[in-house]
Image (spheres, helix red, strand yellow):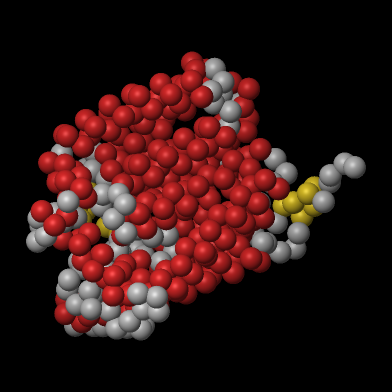
Amino acid sequence: MVRKESVKSHPDYILLTVIIALLLLGIIMVFTSSYIWAEYKYDDMFFFVKRQLLFASVGVIGMIIIMSIPYHFWMVYSKVILLVCFLLLMIVLIPGIGMVRGGAQSWIGVGAFSIQPSEFVKLGLIIFLSKKLATNQKHITSFKRGFLPLLLLVFTIFGLIMLQPDLGTGVVLVLTCMVLLFVGGARILHFIGLALIGSIAFIFLILSAPYRISRITAFLNPWEDPLGDGFQIIQSLYALGPGGLMGTGLGNSLQKYFYLPEPQTDFIFAILGEELGFIGAGFVICLFALFFWRGIKVSLESPDHFGRYLALGIVSLVTIQTLINISVVIGLIPVTGITLPYLSYGGSSLTLTLCSSGILLNISKMTFH
């Protein structure tokens, strides 16, 4: 029986429900994790949650609009999108324009707000690679004609991100692109060679910056420097431990009282685990697992190669970032500075994640029957 392509009048409702559930839970957790710090620093306990609501509103509006735009639109303008993202990455490095936060020059100020170009380039690169893989898939097995040009593009952008420097974002971008190239048909032999070279380069990047070495040693034994490099991970574990099965109750976290630095961002999962316990943390992990399953389903059922790669790229981006963030919080890997998608406080990250979700939901309207 021949399968026919059809357009549904609605997106994947399960996927949409998961996204909204994560977003709403994120808004609640941003408030409960940040109001002490916001009251102390800004004399307004609602400072962070008000901004998060604004970011979420912009993101949801963007998601709804993008959900109605046929995803092939992004294929047509993939080069323009990537070029704009590339220029933004260049601009942010210009002294006086790029804003420095947490030691990284990663933001461009726009009025009272700021944007983070590295967040935009993640989506732009996924769109561009999806088009290349869809239209030139026969060349991907060739190292010179297929694999190498795309690899050079990925690592050029990675290099610009490292100049900020932002190793965590760079790692997420590279891993997502490697997933796309692997599924796109690149040869295993190419990845073996890349892994060897990448391992050497990664070690060099670690050794070239003393603070990265400190993060590694703090990861191996955080109690060796409990008030310095090991402080964040120790306080994160102190948050998760008392949470137990049921948690201390929503709003009853102790670690947000200036123990865990800015808990509404990278370590929001630790506060969630403290207040909602193993059950709450497990529920969030289940939501992300459901997101992954439905997203992969959308990718597999997409009627063309571009839709499949684009959906896979977006799902991989969110999943890899989630795995890294939670792994950091529970002490499995060193601190990276990566936010938790949909939940962590942040303008560019949340808005771009929701807009990416709009593309994924649009692809879910296309199916086979």
Hey, which quadrant is residue 65 in on the image?
Answer: bottom right
Total tally of numbered discs in the picture: 0
**Left or right of residue 271, residue 207 in this image:** left
Q: Residue at x 42, y 60 (%)?
A: 341
Residue 240: give x, y in percent of width and height: 30, 69
Residue occupying the point 25% across, 52% down? 335
- Pick whichever, 179 or 67, lies toward us: 179
Kindly tell me whether residue 241 is visible in this rendering.
yes
Say whether residue 71 is left or right of residue 99.
right
Please tell me which residue is depicted at 32% across the width and 59% down the height of the picture: 330
Can you say whether 327 is above or below 308 in the image? below
x and y, in percent, of residue 44 in the image: 24, 83
Residue at 63% over, 22% down: 138
Residue 26 shows in the view: no
Give residue 108's position: percent from left, percent from top.
28, 53
Residue 267 lies, with reference to residue 3, above or below; the image says below
